[in-house]
Amino acid sequence: MWQLRYYVLATIEVKDHHTGENLANEIKCIVEDFGISNTPVSGITTDNAANMVTMTTHLDWPHIRCFAHTLQLSVKAGLKIKEISSAAAAARKLVGHFKRSSLASNELKSRQRQLDLPEHTLLQDVPTRWNATYIMFERLIEQRLAIFAVLHNNTITSPSDARILELPDQVWKVIEDLVPVLKPLQVATTTISGTSFPTLSMVYPIVIGLLKNHLNVQGEDSTVLVKFKEAVTKDLSSRFPKSDHDLATHHAVLTCALDPRYKSLKFMTDEQRNLVKSSIDKFDTQTEQVPVEPPVAVKSENTDNAESNKAEVNAMSFLLGDLVDLTGEEVDAEKSLVQEYEMFVRETAVKGNADPLDWWKNKADSYKKLAPIAKFFLCIPGTSVPSERVFSDTGNIVTKKRASLDPDTVNQLVFLRSVLSSTKTKVDSAEESVLPDDKNSSSTSALEVKQERASEPPSPSKKESLPPLPLLEPDNDEDD
């Protein structure tokens, strides 16, 4: 089975201190309750908090740091630069004025209509999310003329307030220089936070793409922009392995090597690629118990999915540039694991509307040794976004009118919600196969635990499936 599946196994109240050891004990209890304590664990993805790192050490599971959180920490390092933080504070004060004043807000709408600008409200950032700062800056640039008109209308804004609120030219310069650089960082965050397709394999291509194509210092960059790029680059680079051995054994790199989109590993040296091949060879005995599915025909995508796929394709092309190649060679005989991997690397890279999991579904029979290892790694999420979204799902259950729900009841309700969501998806998929013109699609809820298993999931229901996956592809430059 080559589908990503998400399950919320438990949503529990931790009454003791949230130390790494206590959290590890809680997770051990959960997997024992579900009878999966002996199931091999590909990896555990968490944020960068110290207690999370300690927890994974006690569990002795491979630890993957959430890339979305890592990227946020790096970008925030750049936003701390004095000129940028001052510009953000001034912008925050300006937006806050329009949020508090209905008179100014209504006048802004009037000016937007006069100037033929989009009738968008100004958005204020929040300290915990750097991309909110990007969105605030972007919206200010879009509405600059309308804002200027409101601030210089003495019947709406007093001259003294206007002098305090109006952004100086140097602040506008910082904002305008920063937005084009923040955009690819925002695209990277959005793309890596997907839940219906493999994401861990995208981490290194995205990091290298950002460093090579978007954070490299240009001759025309302003002093502030140079400082920002250097700060983000330094922080981001410090959060990944330095030595060749650590790099070649990192789960994000191994997953990338097994993804038909990025298998060329163009960001690595020949020596590093050989180390990756050796690392994959060592995993052979660890994944023998994972069965390989026979080839299955891939269903064509409907129009709605094609549009979604196109957006993902464009995002990855924008981020990665020329970090993949498209040379190909067919596998024609059963070979050793190393030989299979070498043939896999020479396969034609995924392009068009192909998905890496669909590719492996069709090719698994030709790679009897490599396919189980690919399944073992490709299921690992690159971010902890799925588990964080459980908070939103739980918030829809525990409302003000249901604030007295017992923790055990909440746990059962969240679990059942995930089961019913999976069941609904299977029904929708079955209807779609009977009615090809039906363009309705369903999505699974974001769930805390991600598994790629051939056996039935540890759930009361055996009815689950996923809708067609959003598709990704690298830059398909035939001259590459």
Image (tube, rainbow, N blue to C red):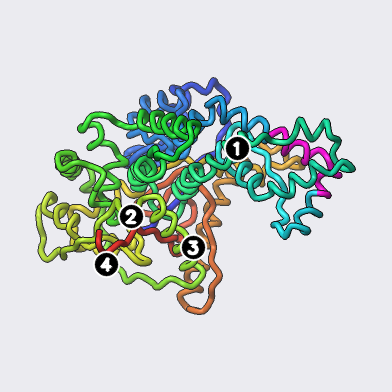
Which residue in the protein does label 1 denote?
408
Q: Which residue is mark 3?
A: 308
Q: Residue at x 78, y 58 (%)?
A: 114
Above or below residue 253? Residue 428 is: below
Question: Magenta-highlighted stretch: main secondary structure?
Answer: helix
- Please say if the residues under marks 1 and 4 sit with CB atoms less than 8 Å apart: no
Q: Is residue 328 visible?
A: yes
**N-term-proximal mark, 1 vs 4:** 4
How far across and how far down the image is residue 348, in percent?
22, 63
Q: Amino acid at mark 2?
A: Ala
Position of 160 with respect to 403 (left or right) is right
Q: Residues within 10 Å of mark 2 (few under 14, many from 20)?
A: some
Q: Spatial distance from mark 1 to mark 3, Cα to Cα?
A: 38 Å
Amino acid, disc 3: Ser
Return the residue at label 4: 295
Q: Position of residue 12 (x, y in %)?
A: 55, 35
